[in-house]
Image (spheres, helix red, strand yellow):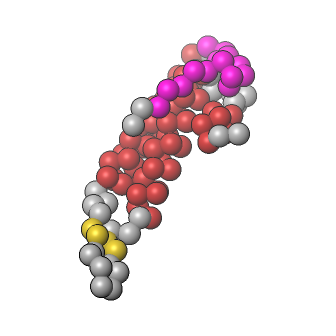
Amino acid sequence: MNDLQTWLDERAGEDGVDDAARVHWAYYRAYSAVASRIAATPASINVPGAIGVSVGSGASPYFAKLAERKLQAFEARVAANLAGGSGARKVSSRSTPVRFTW
């Protein structure tokens, strides 16, 4: 099972969690993973007798902010579903098409 399917399944079946909320959750998890990987990457690497490489880590806060926005969207969607008594549909994750573009 891939990460995307796992992330979609994490919140399946919870009250107020519909397809749109699960997509927000999957984006939150994906952006969080990217931010963590970038933050864990060394900013510079120096090998004695070789050329040193420096990589900017300024992208980590950008992805962390995207993750926070998706988490807020998820929470807002669930709250709206619960407040509105919409009876958010509990469906199989297989019916949720999601396309990530980087």
Q: Residue at 33%, 86% (x, y): give it.
A: 48
Q: Which residues are magenta?
A: 86-100
Q: Position of residue 68 (x, y in %)?
A: 42, 43
The answer to whether 102 appears left or right of 32 in the picture is left
Q: Nearer the viewer, residue 1 or 19?
A: 1
Secondary structure mainly formed by the magenta segment: loop
Q: Which residue is most to the front?
A: 49
Residue at 32%, 68% in the rendered image: 43
Q: Residue furthest top?
A: 86
Q: Is residue 26 magenta?
A: no
**Residue 32 pos. (x, y %):** 48, 48
What residue sits 65% from the left and 34% below the top? 5
Q: Where does the image place residue 26, in percent across and percent down from the top left?
A: 55, 36
Give 39 or 76, whichever is nearer the viewer. Answer: 39
Answer yes or no: is residue 54 visible: yes
The quarter of the picture where the C terminus appears is top left
